[in-house]
Amino acid sequence: MAIHAAVIVVVTTPFDEDTLVATSEPLVLLDLRGEEIATLPAVGVDRSRWTPLAQVPSIAVAAVIESEDHNFYRHRGVDGVGIARAMYLNVRGGRYGGSTLTMQLSRMVLGTNERSMSNKLREMLLAMRIERAVDKRTILEQWVNRAYFGNGAVGFDAAARLYFDKPVSALSDGEALLLAVLPRAPTGYDPLKHLERALRRRDYVLDMLVARGVVTAEQARDARVTELAIGKHVPKNHAPHFVQYVLSELPANVRHAGGTLHTTLDLQMQRRLQKRVSEQVATLARLNLDQAGLVVLDGQTSEVRVMVGSTGWSHAGGQINITTRRRHPGSALKPFVYAAAIERGANPASIAYDIRETSPGYMSGEEHGPVRYREALASSYNFAA
């Protein structure tokens, strides 16, 4: 009796609808002239790309309901039959099933994916509160904007832009139907890796829609023959290593809030020097040099003007930022040693003695006797330095 009373109290507690308001935005990085470097997607639900349910193809909404919760319009947040099945599977040590769309929305709001009976109970109670507070269309709109579609895409519109390079409102029925089944298993139905598997799931759901009279056989046939030009379309990033560096220094709350961030990068200079680095490495490929990096700092403010982390992001090893990677300086110090000597009056033709007697005892290497600075530096002679 006490447990029953507690459940009634929880379920009848008013649900704060502000909990459903999306608060995150994309983060736009600009260079010192205001030119866009990159636009990073929102962390979580993107309020700037919130899609009204009316803009989602109706056939996709029907497919979501059929794929995820075909009793959606007949329950008040919890499907008794589905929960009974979930409890049976729990006893058998299987996966938990039975989550309605409203329970899935509860999980998204709670921010947890842990599969346990205690979490299932929390989802059920919150789902019933949500159903008392908002209508079914609102629940569907929340779901299509919060569901995960794989490869970092949160929401139907983000998935449409990622996989088809178009907004959700421009999707064909065939494209929309494919996206509708992805949240069921974002990894297993990943269309970039398992397209045939995803299409089989789409066709199964389509058959169910035809059987229930939701779509006609002709509509289903047209959807099946639609050509799918699927790919991974990501926003351009003109300085990926610099962007990564900025994100590593950015407080989490700033990243989550999104907005516009002005940086110290000079994108015009970045492009020129990125090209020069790539060209120079190409000329030295015969010497087994395949990567290089470059940083340019403002001499007065120490602000980063250029950060070339590699010859190219898509090249082998290109995603490693050479400029921020911690390594023993070794011979990289030698140019500074010679620069200090030149500041004191020496010149590239000055003589250095590359002999062991003038060097610390721990150094090793071949002796070359008297050599000019330019030769010693170019050849990286240890004793001369």
Image (cartoon, rainbow, N blue to C red):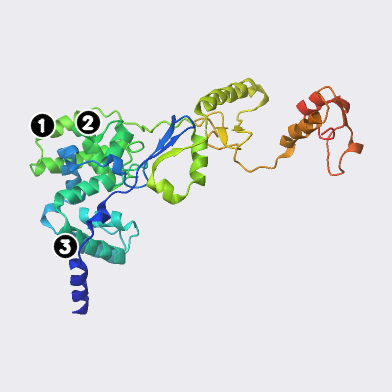
User: Image point 63% across, 43% down: which residue?
Assistant: 326
Q: Eyeballing the image, is 95 above or below 290? A: below
User: Image point 84% across, 35% down: which residue?
Assistant: 383
Disc on the earlier residue, 2 or 1: 2
Q: Secondary structure at mark 2?
A: helix
**Horizontal and vertical percent for residue 252?**
44, 50
Cα–Cα gap, marks 2 and 1: 21 Å
User: As rendered, which of 353 and 192 lies closer to the eye?
Assistant: 353
Identify the image quadrant of residue 260: top left
User: As rendered, which of 120 and 209 lies closer to the eye?
Assistant: 120
User: As rendered, which of 352 and 282 lies closer to the eye?
Assistant: 352
> Of the residues shown, which amino acid type is indicated by label 2?
Ala
> Of the residues shown, which amino acid type is indicated by label 1?
Glu
Identify the image quadrant of residue 1: bottom left
Cα–Cα gap, marks 2 and 3: 37 Å
**Horizontal and vertical percent for residue 227?**
24, 27
Disc on the earlier residue, 2 or 3: 3
For residue 80, the mark is 3
Residue 197 seen in the current view: no
**Front disc: 2 or 1:** 2
Residue furthest to the front:
300
Relative side of 4 to 29, left or right: left
For residue 218, the mark is 1
For residue 246, the mark is none
User: As rendered, which of 38 and 108 lies closer to the eye?
Assistant: 38
Disc on the earlier residue, 3 or 1: 3
**Horizontal and vertical percent for residue 203?**
20, 38
Mark 2 — residue? 170
Relative side of 360 to 93, left or right: right
